[in-house]
Amino acid sequence: MSSATLTLPTNLHCSACVEKIEPILNEEKSIQDWSVDLEPDVKTLSIQGNDITEDYVDRLLQKAGYAVVREQGTKTGNFWGDAQKWKRASFNTLNCLIGCSIGDFGMIIFLQAYYSETSIMTQMILAIIAGLTTSVMLETIIMKVREQFGWKEAFQTAISMSFISMIAMEIAMNVTDFAMTGGKAAFADPMYWIALAIALLPGFLVPLPYNYYKLKKFNKACH
């Protein structure tokens, strides 16, 4: 057996992530020493041991929900054919959709019910702002609870990793809703609620390829 030291970029975020991988790495007899550098934008794991490889380290990190960040120029197989990444990206997108929908549709219903004189453009702008706000709030809570981030780091991660996806989602939902209802809420009409439900589909599908791309190429996801 030969001892070697690897320094690998990872999608770890913070000290809480390090605490998650600590018991996994410590129980491996082939690993002699390891440390994580949390200073750079892409956190690196330096690991020393006998006959360790990048794939071996990657499998260990995946036990805790993390991974080695592969080189951006590396292409293996069909880039868009990773079923596991599609599953993870779909889960991430669904969480974002739930957060956006709460604020978006809630704002539309509120304005139509109490301020029906508000222009359609103003309603759409306010709905998008409300949807972005509730989506960031939901994803911040998810990362606080599930990833054990601090509140500040959870909020910053939600903003930096999810904002483009949220904007695309909001535009897709509002354009679809406007095309089907003309921006008018008819709460007693079942077709109005059907239109809102249909608007969720493009809201989910439009940002999904972007979320998959980030997850596949950069191992970046918001949760």
Image (tube, grey):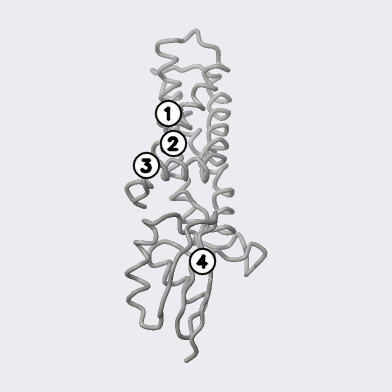
Please give the count of numbered marks on the rendered protein: 4
- Identity, as a three-letter code, of the amino acid under mark 3: Trp
Picture residue at 44% right of the left edge, 37% below the top: 136
Q: Position of residue 75 (x, y in %)?
A: 65, 67
Residue on which disc 4 sits: 68
Q: Is residue 67 above or below residue 49?
A: above
Mark 3, mark 2: which one is toward the viewer? 3
- Using the numbered discs, state the Cα–Cα distance from disc 3 to disc 4 in whole angstroms: 25 Å
| 171 relative to 58 in the view: left or right | right
Picture residue at 64% right of the left edge, 62% below the top: 72
Q: Position of residue 83 (x, y in %)?
A: 51, 61
- Identity, as a three-letter code, of the amino acid under mark 1: Gly
- Using the numbered discs, state the Cα–Cα distance from disc 3 to disc 1 in whole angstroms: 21 Å
Q: Is residue 55 above or below residue 221?
A: below
Circle 1: element type: helix
Picture residue at 44% right of the left edge, 68% below the top: 35
Residue on which disc 2 sits: 135
Residue on which disc 3 sits: 151
Disc 4 crowd, CA 10 A, few/some/many (<14, 14-19, 20+) = many
Q: Is residue 110 above or below residue 157?
A: above
- Identity, as a three-letter code, of the amino acid under mark 4: Val
158 or 186: nearer the viewer: 158
Q: Position of residue 74 (x, y in %)?
A: 65, 67
Are discs 1 and 4 less than 8 Å apart at CB? no
Mark 3, mark 1: which one is toward the viewer? 3
Sequence order check, earlier mark of 3 and 2: 2
- Using the numbered discs, state the Cα–Cα distance from disc 1 to disc 2 in whole angstroms: 8 Å
Are discs 2 and 4 less than 8 Å apart at CB? no
Are discs 1 and 2 less than 8 Å apart at CB? yes
Circle 2: element type: helix
- Using the numbered discs, state the Cα–Cα distance from disc 1 to disc 4 in whole angstroms: 35 Å
Are discs 3 and 1 less than 8 Å apart at CB? no
